[in-house]
Amino acid sequence: MPTSTRPDLLLPADPGQRALARELYALVARLPIISPHGHVDPALLAEDQPFGDPAQLLIVPDHYLTRMLLSQGVPPSELGVPSRDGTPVETDGRRIWRRFAEHWHLFRGTPSRLWLEQTFTEVFGVDTRLSPATADEVYDALAAKLAEPDFRPRALFERFNIEVLATTESPLDDLGRHAKLAADGWGGPGGRVVTTFRPDNVVDLEFEDWSANVDRLGEITGEDTGTYAGYLAALRARRAAFIDAGATSSDHGHRTARTLDLGADAATLFDRARRGRAEPGDAEAFAAHMLLEFARMSLDDGLVMQLHPGAVRNHNRWLYARHGRDVGGDIPQVTEYVHALAPLLDAYGNDPRLRVVLYTLDEDTFTRELAPLAGGYAALLLGAPWWFLDSPEVLRRFRETVTETAGFYNTAGFVDDTRAFCSIPVRHDVARRIDAGFLARLVAEHRLPMDEAAETIVDLAYRLPKQVYKFGEGQQ
């Protein structure tokens, strides 16, 4: 990566703290990237084809960007977002780019602007400020770079200094892309690109085509998923296949953090849902029960559990009907953890064999719930602020609010949680700068010696995520 055009970006304004932060940041600026949770399509690296035009790469798939324009009346179809209802969408990359540039002012002060500007300068070496007047100039400069061999996916992966990248797939995925990566020496256990087991589409009773998905799960595994016992066996089989493909973790995107042990009633509920007779409350109860089942499976197979609760999916129903999932229509909600997690923590919270990395979209819980929980149970670790919270301000507040109770070592390192491949190094760089500033303040206030701050920032940026997510020393 080129030297930053803004070397003091996000570092403290106070001169003394800034000098300390510079020293600390220098220790991690060029460390390898561990990316343990994200949504990059593995086909990108498996096929290693040139990227499309700048709009198709940077705007169309990025719901952080398209949802902002939607909030100002610009429909996603004008930005090239594929439709599911037959609505015509713009396909001309330059016109999409110009439309986006007309609304660039909407992103003033947002992390989206920070990430995109840093991607322009640090990844592509394009330092022209985006505006309606410069839209074509920036587009042409980016397009010229994308035509070069050094800007194909695997070449960028190398330049980004990514040591491990975890993608996210459902149990219904055939993992063919990961098989190709393994055959090319990129994937498999200990590989540079690994998969993550995300079973939401066969666990959430309200997921579109849930019952058909469970049927497909049975076909893939040869298990009878018409029964609850067969369903659990099929999930275990797919977890084993994911582990063979390099997975070290599972991921669970539930609406709430509730956990529940239904006992024998789980089979009754499952059978009722399979017959299309699910009752109100069944979906949440079944998902809550399955978190305990997955914890039990993790004790057997060693997968790290990631729990991402708190998103009301497809809140914008018009957007979902027209464009489908994961296009900016989800909204955070208040999320409770102390009572919700009690059944799981009662059962397994003190077992050091289990690792549960817990995330939140509810910042109010940092101090009141999450830090005390992570500071009190061996199995529980705090994931970094994600999605609506992965901004510089919240990353700072996270350190300020959880460190006094949970410390640094009950956290799990940074995750970029992105589909935007080219923004990965930028997002990790932002997190490293924020941590440098926070640690510099502790040093300046004589709360932490400089040598310990130096060790800590390397742990946060590199050693902790590698350890927590079980990425061993055998990486290629």
Image (tube, rainbow, N blue to C red):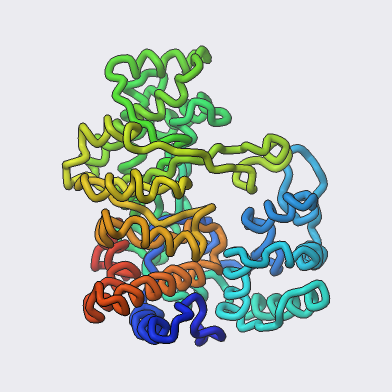
Q: In this view, does 351 lie above or below 434?
A: above
Image spot of residue 64 (x, y percent): 62, 56
| Residue 138, quarter of the rendered image | bottom right
Image spot of residue 9 (x, y percent): 51, 79
Q: In this view, does 130 lie to the left or right of 278?
A: right
- State the residue in front, 43 or 308: 308
Image spot of residue 412 (x, y percent): 32, 58
- State the residue in front, 226 or 67: 67
Give the residue drawn at x 43%, y 86%.
Answer: 15
| Residue 272, quarter of the rendered image | top left
Q: Is there any visible trace of residue 193 in the rendered image?
A: no
The image shows a total of numbered marks equal to 0
Give the residue drawn at x 47%, y 30%.
Answer: 204
Q: In this view, does 113 lie above or below 352?
A: below
Give the residue drawn at x 79%, y 57%.
Answer: 91
Q: Is residue 193 left or right of residue 115?
A: left
Image spot of residue 123 (x, y percent): 56, 77
Q: Is residue 275 left or right of residue 248?
A: right
